[in-house]
Amino acid sequence: MAAANEYETAAHQDPSESNLFDWGSELLLHRTLDPAVEVFRQASQRYPNSPRLAVGLGVALYSRGNYDDAVKALIKGADLNPSDARCYLFLSRAYDSSPNQADEVIQRFRRFSELQPTNGRAFYYYAMSLWKGKRAQDPDLDLGQIQVLLKKAIALEPKLAEAHLQMANLLSDQGKFTEAIPEYTTALGLNADLADGYYRLGQAYVRTGQKEQAQKEFETYQKLRAEHLADLDKQRAEIRQFVYAAKESSAAKP
């Protein structure tokens, strides 16, 4: 709180882009969310061409659960600095809870994959934006493009557990349970905290007649759910990473 007060004093005495970002970030890191939103909102109005203020506003709105406005702010941040990967994690999270702006979000993730053709996560985001956005609109969606994008994501970043998990889900949704099982086991081997992966793997084992193995996966799923996976701690870590990276990149500029 003492640090937050000092940042506030600095921002009032000198409302520079840097001081306002520091103040909003300190509030955000300590999950003082309403004041953080207000600081970032006013700062973004004062400095409309600052990508990190736009992303900061989006992260604060996302953390508060205001997903529609978070998507809008993060889209602006992506447009101000299309190559900055920090924005896209939070855009994907906010969009997952608010798919109403599907076309605009898909366009940004497609552009990101074009700007960074060797970034596996960029193709993963693009695949998931297509799947999320089109699934609600078109029940007869051809999943081929999504599968191609996920394959590319995995080829570029083999240790991206989420890409393996979603590839497994895609195969399962098509009834290809035997093919899905190795993808589930790979995903869980890379990240043992993917609780839903155990449940979906258990379902795949049931469909292939491996009921004992399925029961083990269901039990693991129930155990993880009972332990309440530290989603909040993970979100805080992601926010810290964004804040520190944004400060470092700003300090490195001439």
Image (spheres, rainbow, N blue to C red):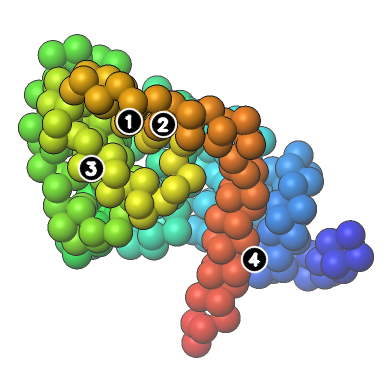
| Type of amino acid under label 2 | Lys
Q: Earlier in the sequence, mark 2 or mark 3?
A: 3
Q: Please give the residue where the numbered disc 1 appears in the rendered image.
A: 213
Residue 64 in the image: x percent, y percent? 66, 36
Q: Residue at x 31, y 54 (%)?
A: 160
Residue 89 in the image: x percent, y percent? 43, 50
Q: Nearer the viewer, mark 4 or mark 3?
A: 3
Label 1: state its secondary structure.
helix
Q: Nearer the viewer, mark 2 or mark 3?
A: 2
Q: How far apart are the alpha carbons under marks 2 and 3?
A: 17 Å
Q: Earlier in the sequence, mark 2 or mark 4?
A: 4
Label 2: state its secondary structure.
helix
User: Which mark is on residue 17?
Assistant: 4
Q: Earlier in the sequence, mark 1 or mark 3?
A: 3
184, 52: nearer the viewer? 184
218, 1: nearer the viewer? 218
The reply to whether discs 4 and 1 touch (Cβ–Cβ < 8 Å) is no
